[in-house]
Amino acid sequence: MKDCSNTYVYLCGVIAIIGIISTSYFYLQSEEQKTNIESLRQDRNLFLNQTKQKDSQLLVASTTIDELTSQLSDLKDDLEDLADDYRDERNRNEDFEDQIRSLSGTLGDLDKLAKTDKELLQKYSKVYFLNENYIPERVSKIDDKYIQDGKPDQYFHARAIDHLEDMLKAAKRDDIDLKIVSAYRSFDEQTSLKGQFTQVYGTGANTFSADQGYSEHQLGTTIDLTVDSVNGTYGSFADTEAYEWLLDNAYKYGFILSYPEGNEFYVYEPWHWRFVGTDLARDLHRGKDTFYELDQRKINEYLLDFFD
Ligand SMILES: [Zn+2]
């Protein structure tokens, strides 16, 4: 019986020790969990605080972004206004430049016109005549190879002589050997020539030799042409290939036939060609009116580009 009670006491002691140990263990466990929970709570609070802080920072940032956006938009408006102003200013400048350009163009034209002798496009007849004191601005000697034998020292208007020589060269390329019988004639030469005609033909000379001062030859821009085959006689020039060639080509070099067949201004002169500028010669060639039929005001419009 004594043994039995010892065993019991022993068992009770073991159980008590186990109880104490496990109670302590669970107590410690729970304390640790409490500590963990507390730490988690602190972490959570810290996190919440940080979140709140971030939120307020975000709010500040978004306010700043809104302000910046609005400032940018204002800047953009300002820039657009500036660009508009710049465009307006540039347009004004361009308009001004255009005005200057057109003004200087007009001045250039006026200057060119002032330097172009108006007589060069006048019509001369029994009514309108060239002053006896008139002399061309400047004349140049025509190359002797283009001159009919026995008619040396022929002169032509210096500013138009290139057109004349271009025409004579072009004719030569087409085997038309044009020769000049007469070119620039001064008033005195014209007077003496008229005297010769008058002596031979009496007053009838008026019909085929212009009265002194009326002659287009005094301008320096008119020539009488021939070819060897007609032996210097004017009359049969109209039957030559050279005449046909001139009718087809002279306008390209600015020359026109002053007195065509059937004209009412003067006797038909197939040999007598006058330089009137390439623009007018071309338009006369295309149209139906002759130089003398055209209105003087219309003719004057061609003066600006006379020598071009
Ligand atoms: Zn003539």
Image: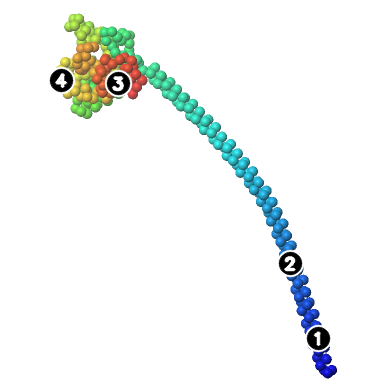
Find numbered disc 2 in the image and state the secondary structure of the residue it sits on: helix
Q: Judge left or right: residue 2 versus residue 192.
A: right
Find numbered disc 3 in the image and state the secondary structure of the residue it sits on: helix
Camera-nearest residue between 51 and 74: 51
* Amino acid on which disc 1 is placed: Cys
Which marked residue is nearer to the observer: mark 1 or mark 3?
A: 1
Report the residue marked by disc 2.
Answer: 37
Mark 4 vs 1, N-terminal side: 1
136 w.r.t. 253: above or below: above
Q: Gap between marks 2 and 4, in whole Å?
A: 134 Å
* Amino acid on which disc 3 is placed: Leu
Find numbered disc 4 in the image and state the secondary structure of the residue it sits on: helix
Decide if ligand 1 comes within 8 Å of the CB at mark 3: no
Mark 1 vs 2, N-terminal side: 1
Q: Quadrant of residue 32?
A: bottom right
Report the residue marked by disc 4.
Answer: 239
Which marked residue is nearer to the observer: mark 4 or mark 1?
A: 1
Label annotation for residue 280: 3
* Amino acid on which disc 2 is placed: Ile
Mark 2 vs 4, N-terminal side: 2
Q: Residue 153, how many percent across, how many down?
A: 26, 17
Q: Quadrant of residue 131?
A: top left
* Amino acid on which disc 4 is placed: Asp
Q: In this view of the protein, can residue 165 be seen by the observer?
A: no
Label annotation for residue 12: 1
Which marked residue is nearer to the observer: mark 2 or mark 4?
A: 2
* Residue at the image position 45 percent from the left and 22 percent from the top: 103
Find numbered disc 1 in the image and state the secondary structure of the residue it sits on: helix
Q: In this view of the protein, can residue 71 be seen by the observer?
A: yes
